[in-house]
Structure formats: C-alpha cells, structure tokens
Image: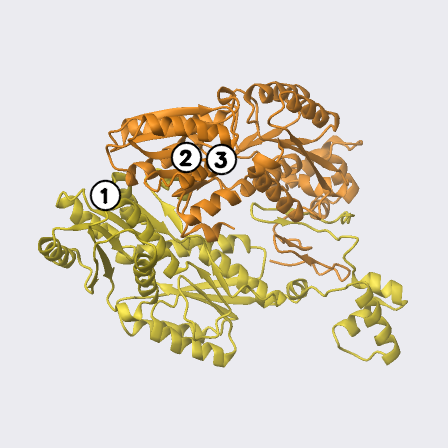
Chain colours: A yellow, B orange
C-alpha cells in the first residue's frame, strides 16, 4: 500500500468521513494504463471515455490492458471533476403542530447533508400539509418544477403519491421512499420500518403483559385510514399475532378516530371504556399515543397497558411516567440519512441500492429511552 | 467549493467511506501561505514543522498569515505521507466453545479493518482463555512485546486487567475499553453497554409480565463473580429496579453458579425450583440463558419468564421458540468497530474521544430479532 505524497496536497478530516488525497498501488490509474500500453494519458482517456479518434488496434490494446489491470472508471470522481451539480428534493409532511414526528426525518436530512458538504450536492426540503387534501398535489408540482436529479418521498398518502410517482417514472427521475412504501410503483429503494412486523412486535409486548382474559383495543387515529398505508399494515400485523401466536383469549376491538382532537378522543374512549369494563390494553398505531395516555391518566386507569409509536416529547414524557408502557421506534432520522446516501451513490456511481431496507423495530421503555437521543 | 482536477488522480469509492482526492477552497494549503507571505513552500514548511533556520521576521510573518488563514496542519495527512505505520492490538476472550459471544466482537474488528484498508494500519487480535487463570497474564505480555501504538481491551477480569492497564499507562500506550470498563484506570475511552442500566431494563421487562406475587431468581453463571464486573453491575441494576420502581411483591433470589456445565445448572435449578414453588421469572445476567432455557424446556416450565443476554445462536433459537422471552443485546460488533475508529482518530489526529460511550440497550424479542442480523 502506498499513499499520495504530493507535497501540495492538504487533506481534510471530518467526523463522518475521512477525506484525503490518496492513491492505492492496487488501484490502477489512467497513467498506469498509458505506461503499460506505451501511449499518452490523453489517448487512454479518449478510449476509456469513448471520445475522439484512436486507431482501432491501439484502442483494443488499451481496453485489453485496462481489463487486465481491473481498471474501473470511478464515476463519482468523474462527476466531481466535471463539477456536475446534483439537486435532490425531499417531499414529506409538515412537522408543525400535531405532526412533530416528522421533525426527526428532517434531522436525518440535515445530518446527511453535513456529510456531503464537500460535494456539489444540494437538497431542497418541501413539506406538505397532511390535513389539506390539495396540498400534496400543489407541492408535488413545485418539486417537479425544480427538475431534480432525485427525490426522497414519504408516500403516506397512497393515492396522491402513486400519481406523483407515475409522473416521476415517466420523466425518468429516480425516487426513494422512506417511512412507508407503495408496492405498485417503480421506486429505487425503500428505507424504513417493516410496518406489519412492528405491529406484531406491539402485539407481542401487549400479549406478554396483559391478563389473558382481557380485551384489547387497537386505536387508529387517522383522518383517512384507508389511505394511510402504514397504519393499516401495523393493524394487520398486530391482529395477525393474536391469530397465530398470542396467548390472549380476549377480544381485539378496532377503533378508528378520524378527528384526533383530544375532546373527540375522550368521547370515543369514554364510550368504549364505559360499555366494556374488560379492556386490559390499548395499542395506538400512530405517534399519537400521548392522547390516549392523557385520557388514561386523567381517568386513573393505571390498569390499562398502553403501547404506541415514536419518540415524540409528549410520548416520551408519558413513557417515563409509566403511563405508556412501550414505544416502538423506527429510526426516522436514520431513514432519511440513508436515503440521501443511496440517491447520491446511485446518481454518481450507478450503485443500485438494496430495494427494501428494513431498519430495526426498536422497543423503547422508560429504562432504555435515554440511549435513543 | 472546488474539487481536485488533477488528471492523474484516480479516486476510489468504498461502501464505508468516500475516498477521493479533493481540496476545498476554504482549506488553506502550505502553497497558499507561501504565496501570501511571498516565500517558498519549503520556508513555510520549515516554520510550520519547526525545523531548519528561518529569519525571525519571516517566521513571524508566516505564522501570522497561517493564523489568519486558519491553517490547521492535518496530522493524519502528515502521518499518511510519512508512511507511518500504526499497529493496534485487541485483547479479548477466546470465542471458542462456551464463549462464542466473543465472536461478534471479532466481526466488528473485521468490519472496521475493512474500512481502514487504505490506511497504513494493522490490527493484531490476541485472545485469552477465560478459564485459565494465568492465560491473561501470558497474553498481555505478548501484547506488550508487540510494542503497539494503541490497545483495545475487554477488561472483564478486573484485577488482572487493572495490572495490565497500569503497565500500559506507564509505557504511555493509549488503550480503549469495550464490553466493560474499570474506573480506576487511565483508559482513553469506553464503548459498550451501561451494564447497571441494562440490568434495570431486564428487571422492568420481568416486572411487567410476571404476576406480582411471584418470586424472581437472578442467575449468575460465572467462575469468579466478584471479579466479573459487568455481571455484578447488571445484578445491581436489576435489584435496584425492584427497590424503587417495581410492582412485584415477591422475593428476589440471587444464585451464583460457578461451574456452568449443564449438569451443574440442572442440579442447582432443580434444587431451588423444588424448594420454592413460587418462582415466576428468571434473569440470567450473562449470555448463558440458553442453559436455563434448556432446563425450563425439559421440565415443561412454560410458566417461568426467562430474560437473558446476547444473540448467541442457542439463545436466539430459544427466543424464537418462546422459551426465552427477551434477550438484551449490547451491539458487540459496533463496540469494537467504534473502538478501532477512536484509536485511529486519536493516534492520527489527536482527536480525543468521548470517554464514556454507552450504546443502546436493545430489547430483542422473537418478533424483532430478524433485524439484528
């Protein structure tokens, strides 16, 4: 192994990457091929990049030698040299108010972009309002108008996302999914939770700690559940666990609360808890477990096991108090960070990412939550 | 931002790092300082590296300009240029037979070394036999004879490790701990679990799923428990949970089994299960939960909740069968991978690592175990 010893080279060192000037003896350079072929660097360059005229015989000799030396042109290096600018756009729900969960995905984007600071890569983040039907359409048009090289998308509104994806496919713009995915599209890669399996984990945790004869309630807090993919998958996974593995002999009741204002949550829970005195556990399929926690706390229902999703401040606060027993976490920041990396690799070096990358389903309790921040 | 456009530069791209030749406009080089100071590169070099004669006035001008330009000599780059070879040694328990747990740490070492392949870094792995008293001493002498630049140590044998650390400190060899740590030494950094806290997590998991009036057994399978730090810490953490947070009103019984042969484990468990019909849960503080699982399975004791540590094949097999309820995992491969990185950074760029780096206490069940491989 030998290292670059150019006296004018000053190398940089960052937390995330080692960035420095080096060449390995076993990584052949154009220079080495030229030397071996007895031609100029320019000639090798013309052959390898398929431009300009080179005598057929010379051309063949150069390609043969390049092959023997296992020369692989590094597309990223080439792109860097050509000062090609890459523009990515991330399209995800607005993180304000009720939807603070989405702030963590933005952290991941920020982290990724820090690592890519030395590169000619830019990222535009565009968010849509989950509660306005037309906003996704509007924002997706904005995205297209930017003519991006690649797109990161949280396709939680299934129908709208699907239409958008069809446009992207038509225009040849690669896109990666995070948080959830839509099977029927030509996405490059998905990075995120296995929603069905995380539902099974939730069921297992409830099954283990709830008396066997108690009833269990699944709460879906979503304006349009049919169109909210991952909540459906979590519910399906949850129920499947009890069908084939659970010990619990109670009933599983599914609630859908379209309006997630607290007063409405109280109303629905009051009704079911009054009509059914046998409820032992509640599984909230989204990050809004804190609303159910607030209800349980106010009603002194310490006997009900509550399991929900995501490390929102309000959820974590109820977790620490013991009102929420478990939070399932899906590493949102890691999702988007990996997505940026995948698109970058793909665009610059044609590196095809793994199509489905499931991140671990993390089980978070009041005793291990400290490590997740 | 500008990138290196040296035509002879061929850049490489690896999975773990982007390695390429570049210089950023805002990172001043010796050449830039020379230009601004109106002197030769050699003169700047002599001043910055404090060698050779340079007129006082010139020297001061150069240092002032270097300061104004925020020049920071990159030690890593320098080390690379000087072809300085770094030799690390990892000293950890042998992974054979009973101690297969330690194989995962070696995987982390392998992974790290893959990333560092382009560097002039070598790593020697030396393992000691946990069951031979003198072997650690013998192996630590072997380590010293290699005159390493830095050491990775799993100091699970407290007294012996402490003596070894004193020697390292005396010789000025930096060392990092993984798996466990010894407070009273001058270690550079610890990467691993918070053993006390992981014991609390274990207690919480048992407390949640065990009937409140049942007794709980803590099993320590260790030849010399007093000298096995992390098992003590886990036990203390476990017991502390019941003192200040637990709902369980049963007793906590602590067993120490010095000889962990299965026949001996059967003997001890048989005795306690016969004399106490009220045992509802068992917490095994080490990776040997599979031995207790085997006992429970053979005795048809599906009523006992079993929690243990580490994703050994035999443990995972019992986890999938439901005999082990939870395994607590401490990311062994990530521990050693991070240790190599820390030593490398420290040795090459004087980058002081965080002294205590606790990795997450992972809660693993039969439903989420798939993501941990």
Residue at mark 2: chain: B
Quick one: label 3 or label 2, which is nearer the N terminus? 2
Q: Provide residue A131's location: percent of width, then percent of height.
A: 26, 67
Report crowding for label 3: few under 14, some 14 to 19, many 20 or more residues within 10 A (C-alpha): many
Q: Nearer the viewer, residue A145 or B188?
A: B188
The secondary structure type at the circle numbered 1 is loop
Q: Nearer the viewer, mark 1 or mark 3?
A: 3
Tell whether label 3 touches label 1 (CB within 8 Å): no
Q: Nearer the viewer, residue A67 or A205?
A: A205
In this rendering, the answer to whether B253 lies above or below A362 is: above
Report crowding for label 2: few under 14, some 14 to 19, many 20 or more residues within 10 A (C-alpha): many
**Residue under disc 3 on the same chain as residue under disc 2:** yes
Q: Residue B76's quadrant in the figure?
A: top right
Residue position for label 3: B288
Residue A111 seen anywhere in this rendered image of the structure: yes
Residue position for label 1: A323
Residue position for label 2: B198
Q: Provide residue B185's location: percent of width, then percent of height.
A: 55, 21
Q: Is residue B2 left or right of residue B224?
A: right
The secondary structure type at the circle numbered 2 is helix
Residue at mark 1: chain: A
Say which residue appears at 45% left-offset and 57% top-offset: A335
In this rendering, the answer to whether A23 lies above or below B269 is: below
Q: Provide residue B158's location: percent of width, then percent of height.
A: 55, 22
Q: Nearer the viewer, residue B298 or A341?
A: B298
Q: Nearer the viewer, residue A77 or A99?
A: A99
The secondary structure type at the circle numbered 3 is loop
């Amino acid at each position: 192994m030998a290292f670059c010893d150019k006296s004018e080279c000053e190398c940089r060192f960052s937390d995330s990457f080692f960035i420095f000037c080096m060449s390995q003896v076993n990584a052949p350079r154009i220079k080495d091929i030229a030397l071996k072929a007895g031609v100029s660097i320019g000639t090798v360059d013309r052959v390898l990049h398929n431009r300009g005229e080179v005598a057929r015989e010379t051309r063949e000799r150069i390609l043969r030698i390049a092959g023997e030396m296992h020369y692989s042109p590094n597309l990223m290096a080439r792109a860097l040299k050509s000062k090609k600018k890459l523009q990515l756009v991330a399209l995800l729900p607005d993180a304000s108010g009720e939807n603070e969960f989405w702030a963590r995905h933005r952290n991941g984007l920020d982290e990724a972009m820090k690592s890519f600071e030395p590169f000619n890569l830019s990222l535009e983040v565009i968010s849509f309002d989950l509660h306005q039907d037309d906003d996704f359409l509007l924002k997706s048009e904005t995205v297209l108008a930017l003519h991006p090289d690649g797109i990161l998308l949280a396709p939680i509104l299934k129908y709208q996302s699907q239409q958008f994806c069809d446009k992207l496919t038509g225009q040849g713009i690669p896109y990666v999914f995070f948080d959830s995915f839509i099977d029927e599209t030509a996405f490059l890669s998905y990075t995120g939770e296995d929603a069905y399996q995380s539902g099974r984990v939730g069921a297992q945790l409830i099954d283990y700690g709830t008396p066997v004869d108690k009833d269990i309630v699944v709460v879906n807090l979503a304006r349009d559940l049919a169109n909210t993919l991952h909540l459906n998958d979590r519910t399906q996974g949850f129920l499947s666990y009890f069908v084939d593995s659970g010990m619990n002999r109670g009933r599983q009741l599914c609630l859908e609360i379209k309006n997630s204002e607290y007063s409405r949550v109280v109303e629905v829970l009051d009704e079911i808890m009054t009509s059914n005195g046998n409820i032992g556990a509640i599984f909230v399929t989204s990050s809004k477990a804190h609303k159910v926690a607030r209800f349980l706390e106010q009603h002194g229902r310490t006997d009900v096991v509550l399991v929900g999703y995501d490390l929102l401040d309000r959820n974590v606060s109820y977790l620490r108090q013991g009102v929420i027993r478990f939070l399932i976490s899906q590493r949102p920041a890691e999702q988007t960070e990996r997505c940026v990396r995948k698109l970058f690799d793909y665009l610059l070096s044609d590196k095809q990412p793994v199509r489905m990358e499931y991140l671990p389903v993390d089980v978070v309790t009041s005793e291990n939550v400290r490590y997740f921040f």
